[in-house]
Image (cartoon, rainbow, N blue to C red):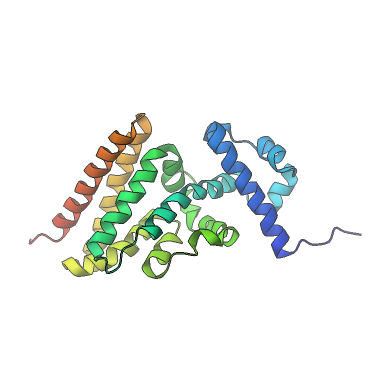
């Protein structure tokens, strides 16, 4: 007789155990310390079982890295004030995102700009199906933004209301979004190449925020 099929609940539990175990390995040894053998030992499941649930180890690693966004999600949901203007929401989102990204620059570089980042929307959807509680406090525009994987799409959602308020066309908003993400990528690389202190990361955040709004001002400048 063949093995009975796992229920959806059992499948999710097995996948979640792999993701949690891989997150622990990354916490302990960094991305360079990840391996199929280590995650198999940590979960008690064979490498063959891993391949039943994940395309390969890279998909598992990417899914585990999404867990590094959980503190950011908590911060942004818990700090949302009433009657926040589009500019305030945009500024607060980037300030909090930079706080967490610059604290773990190698993780965020791999997650949003690494070789698997083009698959992030699909991987993020799978992750939040396993850990729906991480988004349960979010709603509206914030939920739409947080559930996306692509950083370009996440920022474009937040930028929409602000772009309308300052009079950007759709094309100008898209261009501002592209420039802002390229700008952020360079700052994230800087943080990754230097062992900055918390204070230095705050200064880096302030520089980025200033630059991000400079891009917006330039986008809506009279021709």
Q: Quadrant of residue 188?
A: top left
Pick the front one: 96 or 25: 96
- Residue sitting at 33 percent across and 58 percent down? 155
- Residue sitting at 31 percent across and 52 percent down? 94
The quadrant the N terminus occupies is bottom right
User: Can you say whether 33 is above or below 44 in the image?
Assistant: above
Percent across and percent down for residue 163 are 22, 65
Which residue, as the protein is rendered here, is positioned at the far left?
A: 223
- Residue sitting at 51 percent across and 46 percent down? 65
Percent across and percent down for residue 88 are 24, 60
Percent across and percent down for residue 180 are 27, 51
Figure disc tally: 0
Q: Left or right: where does residue 147 sit relative to residue 54?
A: left
The quadrant the C terminus occupies is bottom left
Q: Left or right: where does residue 40 sit relative to residue 199?
A: right
- Residue sitting at 33 percent across and 46 percent down? 98
Which residue, as the protein is rendered here, is positioned at the far right?
A: 1
Q: Left or right: where does residue 80 sit relative to residue 7?
A: left
Q: Quadrant of residue 23?
A: top right
Residue 70 in sight here = yes
Pick the front one: 78 or 99: 78
User: Can you say whether 57 is above or below 29 in the image?
Assistant: below
Residue 54 in sight here = no
Percent across and percent down for residue 7 are 74, 64
């Amino acid at each position: 007789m063949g093995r009975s099929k796992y229920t959806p609940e059992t499948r999710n539990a097995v996948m979640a155990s792999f993701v949690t175990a891989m997150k622990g390995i990354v916490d302990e040894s960094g991305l360079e310390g990840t391996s199929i053998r280590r995650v198999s030992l940590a979960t008690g499941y064979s490498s063959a079982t891993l391949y039943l649930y994940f395309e390969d180890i890279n998909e598992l690693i990417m899914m585990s890295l999404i867990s590094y966004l959980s503190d950011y999600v908590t911060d942004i949901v818990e700090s949302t004030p009433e009657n926040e203007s589009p500019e305030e929401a945009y500024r607060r989102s980037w300030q909090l995102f930079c706080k967490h990204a610059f604290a773990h620059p190698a993780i965020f570089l791999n997650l949003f700009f690494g070789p698997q980042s083009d698959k992030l929307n699909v991987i993020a959807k799978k992750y939040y199906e396993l850990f729906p509680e991480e988004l349960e406090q979010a709603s509206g525009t914030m939920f739409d933004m947080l559930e996306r994987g692509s950083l370009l799409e996440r920022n474009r959602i937040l930028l929409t209301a602000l772009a309308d308020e300052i009079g950007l066309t759709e094309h100008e908003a898209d261009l501002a979004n592209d420039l802002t993400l390229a700008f952020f990528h360079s700052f994230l690389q800087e943080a990754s190449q230097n062992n900055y202190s918390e204070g230095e990361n705050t200064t880096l955040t302030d520089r980025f925020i200033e630059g991000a709004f400079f891009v917006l001002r330039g986008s809506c400048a009279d021709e």
